[in-house]
């Protein structure tokens, strides 16, 4: 591996904002260069230190606790590289290793896909209604990033609307991002307009869908507003 490829890989593993710029160079240099950088990206992804380090970093960000902050966790750099590797694999369209791994970091990489295949969408829909809270959030973020391209899993999102504890909020946010292509969900969203706990989110989804049926439901069911005693 020559020096220029080594430097390119280092850039790709550095994360935002440099990595996306280096991605353009990788693509411009063609399939041979992609083939050279891919094994190192996969190695970095598989070295992902996982949930414990991620949760520790979140604790540092949220609390600033000295107990978390000092000393610096030795795995933080590996987590950054794993995340950058996952994102680059997604930009390159290499979804299979990301899907097989199925970690939070890998799902962050899937969110970079320009044209997610149905197999990816179905897996993300399944994780979006799963019991693993962090994986659920990551899957929802990926589906939201795809926007209308998530339309093939509208039926899955409609099914999640009945899962109050671990699926409804996920489904509502994804349906809103899908927009008009989520029209089959309109009748079920209309029912949620009558639920004071969910009416605001249902309203947002219906507004984004914007079909005549959705607009009529919005007009006929003004948002519930609490009345001061």
Image: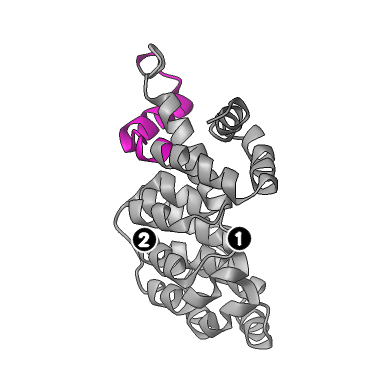
Q: Secondary structure at mark 1?
A: loop
9 relative to 168, above or below:
above
Numbered range of the magenta stretch: 44-67
Query: Disc 2 designates what residue?
Result: 127
Residue at screen point 35% across, 35% down: 47
Q: Secondary structure at mark 2?
A: helix
Q: Is residue 135 left or right of residue 209?
A: left
Q: Earlier in the sequence, mark 2 or mark 1?
A: 1
User: Is residue 194 shown to the viewer in this render?
Assistant: no
Residue at screen point 64% across, 43% down: 26
In this rendered view, identify the residue nearer to me: 201 or 106: 106
Please, what is the dominant secondary structure of the magenta stretch? helix
Q: Is residue 100 left or right of residue 24?
A: left
* Rendered location of residue 48, percent (x, y): 37, 36
Q: Quadrant of residue 69?
A: top left
Tell me how the rendering is colored: one colour
Residue density around tag 2, few if under 14, some if 14–19, many if 20 or more, within 10 Å:
many
Q: Which of pointers 2 and 1 indicates the residue nearer the eye?
A: 1
User: Is residue 121 shown to the viewer in this render?
Assistant: yes
Query: Disc 1 designates what residue?
Result: 114
Q: Are marks 2 and 1 in contact (CB under 8 Å)?
A: no
* Rendered location of residue 92, percent (x, y): 57, 52
Whether the magenta-drawn stretch holds residue 49 is answered as: yes
* Rendered location of residue 46, percent (x, y): 36, 40
Q: Is residue 17 left or right of residue 143?
A: right
């Amino acid at each position: 591996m020559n020096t220029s490829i080594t430097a390119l890989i280092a850039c790709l593993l550095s994360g935002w904002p440099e990595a996306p710029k280096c991605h353009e160079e990788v693509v411009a240099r063609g399939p041979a260069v992609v083939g050279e950088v891919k094994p190192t990206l996969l190695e970095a992804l598989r070295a992902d230190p996982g949930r414990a380090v991620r949760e520790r970093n979140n604790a540092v960000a949220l609390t600033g606790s000295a107990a978390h902050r000092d000393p610096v966790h030795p795995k933080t750099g590996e987590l950054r590289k794993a995340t950058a590797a996952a994102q680059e694999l997604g930009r390159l369209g290499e979804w299979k290793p990301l899907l097989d791994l199925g970690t939070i970091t890998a799902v962050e990489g899937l969110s970079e896909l320009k044209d997610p295949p149905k197999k990816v969408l179905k897996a993300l829909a399944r994780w979006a209604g799963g019991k693993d809270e962090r994986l659920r959030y990551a899957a929802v973020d990926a589906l939201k990033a795809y926007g209308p391209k998530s339309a093939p899993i509208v039926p899955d999102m409609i099914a999640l609307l009945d899962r109050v504890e671990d699926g409804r909020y996920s489904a509502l946010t994804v349906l809103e991002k899908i927009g008009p292509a989520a029209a089959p969900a309109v009748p079920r969203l209309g029912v949620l307009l009558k639920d004071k706990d969910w009416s605001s989110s249902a309203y947002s989804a219906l507004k984004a869908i914007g079909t005549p049926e959705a607009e009529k439901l919005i007009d006929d069911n003004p948002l519930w507003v609490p009345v001061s005693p």
